[in-house]
Image: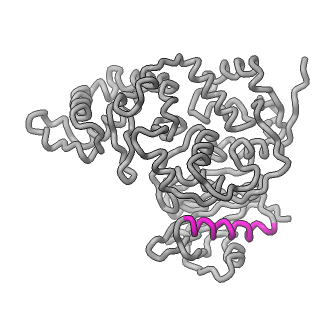
Amino acid sequence: MATIQTLSAAQARRIALGAQGFSGARPASVGVRRLHAGLERMGALQIDSVNVFSRTHYMPHFSRFGPYDRDRLDRLVLSSGGRYVEYRAHEAAFVPVEDWPMWQFRMEHFRQRFGSPGGWAHAHAAVLDRLRDELAARGPLRPAEIDPESERGRRGPWWDWDDVKHGLEVMWLTGEVAIAGRRGFERRYALAEHVVPPEHLHREMTPPDAIRELTRRAAQAYGVATTADLADYYRLRAREVAPAVDDLVASGELTPVRVPEWERSGRAQSAWLHRDAVVPRRIERTALLTPFDPVVWFRSRALRTFGLDYRIEIYVPAAQRRYGYYSLPVLVDDRIAARIDLKADRSGSRLLVQSAWWEPSARAGDAERIADELRLAADWQGLETVSVSTWGDATDELAAALGRADRHDPPRAASVGQQVSDRPRLRA
């Protein structure tokens, strides 16, 4: 029986970060080819509507490459007829349009879910028929461009704006419509045949083949991962992924490894190393991460890999937030050293550090490096200054590292939230 390779936790972290594009220096310039390469490496670029600091789909390229032209990325992913299309990959995400057949199994799942007796599509068949007619006759439309009131007299009381929005979303999930770009951040919906080229729209892929390919891509994107990690990357079930892992091991693409520090309660936890994964000698990088970056988007993996117990507090009542509305994990080398809640004050041309907290892995000198990254982020967003609040145990050090940084009061509810971290800090 072959000996299973053992990796240290530090090696596993470096492999994971290298696989995600954090090894080596940032490029001097970021052109279209670099943006495509970043998208290809991640496999899915998650979308979220929150725009307090920056919309989340802009952040991963900045984290990896530094400042770049966001309009250039918009032209790649938001324009109709391009190389990317939106679908529910991890969550809503930009994916290559050629991957459309790979999501047929998920589309079929939604068709069965919504179309079964008692399902929304079954109960609102007339709504969907009318939406098909509208899109066929008028082409790509935003929900606001479909006027339910104009139909109410001859179509009956079932036709209202909530039905429009819900119906379009159902048709997108089931693959009947696709997103034909956006106006601002509002989706434009179109019949799938008007967006997806025929060679992709009509190509079929069996569920086992699709799941095997998605598992392979997740393994490549993670470098080293558990079965749960591989399943979460594209929101698959562990029982679906297990046969795909077996196939990839048999073909030599995956190798079983042990990461003792990942094992829980003395019980072995299977991990898999992709054959293209490398162990960087070191990671020398400072980066602000969006909560929806693949590095941290799976809470269990973030805790296991970085010791980061991470939860987005958007839906937490303001008075109960511990770290802030939309705190960003901050990578320093191969550590998550801090979490910082940022807000762009566009009218005042300031980047507001609403709160800042050290993580246990923080070290002396991190404040200076993070301050440099904050200056870079402010400049990328077209903001002139950085202002630091007084909420969080890292704010004083960050303000000092920023030199003559402005200070501002914390968010209104911070005074009744937790003001000082009670976690042990390992500073060396």
The quadrant holding residue 176 is top left
Q: Quadrant of the C terminus?
A: bottom right
- Image coords of residue 59 (percent x, y): 57, 54
Give the tally of numbered discs.
Answer: 0
- Image coords of residue 284 (percent x, y): 78, 56
Which residue is drawn at the image coordinates 80% and 27% (left, top)?
A: 256
- Image coords of residue 184 (percent x, y): 38, 54
Left or right relative to 369: residue 261: right
- Image coords of residue 118 (percent x, y): 32, 24
Q: Is residue 127 visible?
A: no
Report the front residue among 426 and 43: 43
Would residue 179 be counted in the magenta stretch? Answer: no
The span picked out in magenta is 364-380
Which residue is drawn at the image coordinates 43% and 46% (left, top)?
A: 78
Which residue is drawn at the image coordinates 73% and 46% (left, top)?
A: 17
Report the front residue among 113 and 171: 171
Q: Quadrant of the N terminus?
A: top right
* Most frequent secondary structure within the magenta stretch: helix
Left or right relative to 106: residue 9: right
Which residue is drawn at the image coordinates 56% and 78% (left, top)?
A: 408
